[in-house]
Amino acid sequence: MKSNAKFFLTAALASTILNAGMAHAQSAEPIQIGLIAPTSGIYARPGQVMKMGAEMAIEDVNKAGGIACLGNAPLELVTIDSGDSVEKATNSAQRMVADFPGLVGATGAYLSSFTLAVSEVTERANLPLLTLSYSDLITSRGFKNIFQTSATAGVQAQIALPIILDLAEQQTGTRPKTVAIITDNTAASLASVDRMKKGLLKDVGLDLSFEQVFTPPLADATSLVQQVRQKKPDLLFFLPTVISDSKLILEKMKEFRVNTPVVSFGIAIAEPEVLNTMQANLLEGVMSAVANWGTKGQEDLIKRLNEKYGEPWMTQNAISTYGDIWLLKDALDKSCSRDRADLGEALRTLNAGPAKYYPGGTLSFDDKGHREGASLTIIQWQNGVPVTVYPDDLALAKPIWPK
């Protein structure tokens, strides 16, 4: 009897201590993290997916105990709609720093042109901002509080082109010699093309047949596709940022029976909504170089995204934003402070080991704010799904050269 009484007393004491600890953790003031992304207008869908990734990560960080050195304080997500123009993004950023002075850090902005504008505001407010945006300009302005988790557009093109050409030669016996480029005029797209034209195409042995730049959204793709049919390039590099533009061009290629292999840069060609407006067979074999995607080892996370939000696969917008929240958590653990200046310094000096939610590199930044060693993923439409085919250690399928 005495042993039983002792057991129950010990159990009761342990329960009391545990409950007290949980009450203490729950009573800690939340740490606010901002997500500034387009949740309205023509770019609303990507912004909504970024929010999904952030919400999942916030949930996971808080389940894991929040920020231990700050009394197990939970993270709290504050979502700000950046709208669908540079002017709206700037105004949203100004409202964000004015209306939420408790924010310690933020992530988002989506389009590079939006990020360039938003980061002007966050820099003045000394607010650390993580971004998946690609433009090389983002981290070339000497700012101290902008951190680019993706490889820049120029680096992505430099990595992707040799891989794509090698794949074509391996599977067809012939190396492509000519390329056409169709691109919109957003900052990241133009940065990729600029890097190609300033030596990269020549370095990999490609001649530029023609280049066409358009302003999204595209009204008619006829003239663009007619040029591809007339010039007959070995490859078409395709850089849209709006889903409707991808649809128009691919449908017009089908109509004109233009069978040039399409290689895209960015995720507009691989958003789930593409299948709402065009048949999967139009997309079969299309490849795209993107900063991040759901990969091997993330199957449970991909499944959870599907079960929670109905997303059929995990795009860059979900996985990168998910990773950004965990990266901010690492920096908060390091700074052990609610002060945004301390968080910025923690990010600048962070060395949290190999990247888990981004391809390649480490959770650390160089003096310009580039994530060190950042690489990319190459995805391909296969059987109605865009799957990761590069790098090999993260691939969910083998690449197939489009016929």
Image (tube, helix red, strand yellow):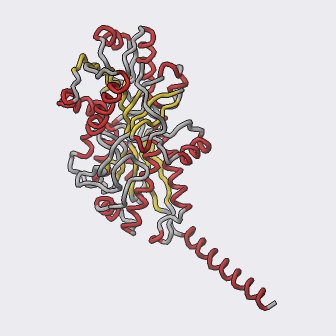
Q: Specify the quadrant of the image occupied by residue 337.
A: bottom left
How many marks overall? 0
Query: Looking at this view, is 367 or 81 the one in front?
Result: 367
Residue at 40%, 56% (x, y): give it.
327
**Looking at this rendering, what residue extends furthest in the right direction?**
1
In depth, the one of 309 and 260 nearer the eye is 260
Residue 192 percent location from the top left of the image: 27, 32
**In which quadrant of the rendered view does residue 109 lie?**
top left
- Report the quarter where the N terminus lies: bottom right
Q: Is residue 123 above or below residue 351?
A: above
Q: Position of residue 43 (x, y in %)?
A: 44, 33
Q: Residue at x 27, y 51 (%)?
A: 369
On screen, residue 46 versus residue 116, left or right, reads: right
Q: What residue is shown at x 22% (from left), y 33% (from top)?
A: 195
Q: Is residue 184 above or below residue 312?
A: above
Q: Is residue 146 visible?
A: no
Confirm whether residue 43 shows in the render.
yes
**Which residue is located at x 37 percent, y 27 percent?**
264
Across and down, in percent, residue 343 comes to: 35, 62
Quarter containing the C terminus: top left
In-front residue for pair 330/122: 330
In the drawing, does residue 313 fall left or right of residue 259?
right
Near-viewer residue (121 or 9): 9
- Please determine whether, in this image, residue 380 is positioned above or below residue 181: below
Task: Give the percent coordinates (x, y) of residue 130.
Answer: 36, 50
